Image (spheres, rainbow, N blue to C red):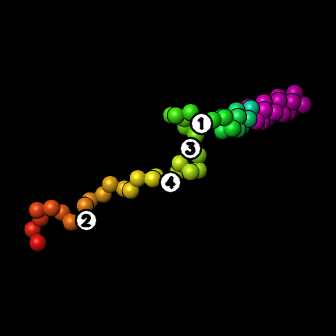
Amino acid sequence: MKYMLNLYLLGVMLTLLSIFVRLMESVGALLESPVPGSPWIARGQLANTEPPKGLPDHPSGGVQ
């Protein structure tokens, strides 16, 4: 039984270590200058600067 507990704790520790390493890689990638095409988006880039392209306000040549 103690053997199984040791294996379980080893798995938990490896999982936590893996999560920690991925988190550190993500933080390192965020601290570097952003590369075009990068999956990371800065807060200022979340808002789209172009207005949405919807229907025109007054259709041209329409029946009144």
**Marks 2/3: CA distance?**
32 Å
At x 66% / y 38%, what residue is drawn? 30
Is residue 15 visible to us here?
no
Which disc, if any, is residue 34? Answer: 1
Q: Residue at x 21, y 66 (%)?
A: 58
Where's residue 61, x and y in %? Answer: 11, 62
- Name the main secondary structure of what is drawn in magenta: helix
Q: Quadrant of the N terminus?
A: top right
Residue 9 among those drawn in magenta: yes
Residues in magenta? Answer: 1-20
Q: Specify the amino acid type for callout 3.
A: Ile
Mark 4–mark 2 CB contact (< 8 Å): no
Q: Earlier in the sequence, mark 3 or mark 4?
A: 3
Image quadrant where residue 38 sits: top right
- Disc 2 crowd rating (10 Å Cα; few below 14, some 14-19, many 20+) is few
What residue sits right under mark 2 in the picture? 57
Disc 1 crowd rating (10 Å Cα; few below 14, some 14-19, many 20+) is: few
Residue furthest bottom as drawn: 64
User: Looking at the image, which is closer to me, 63 or 60?
Assistant: 60
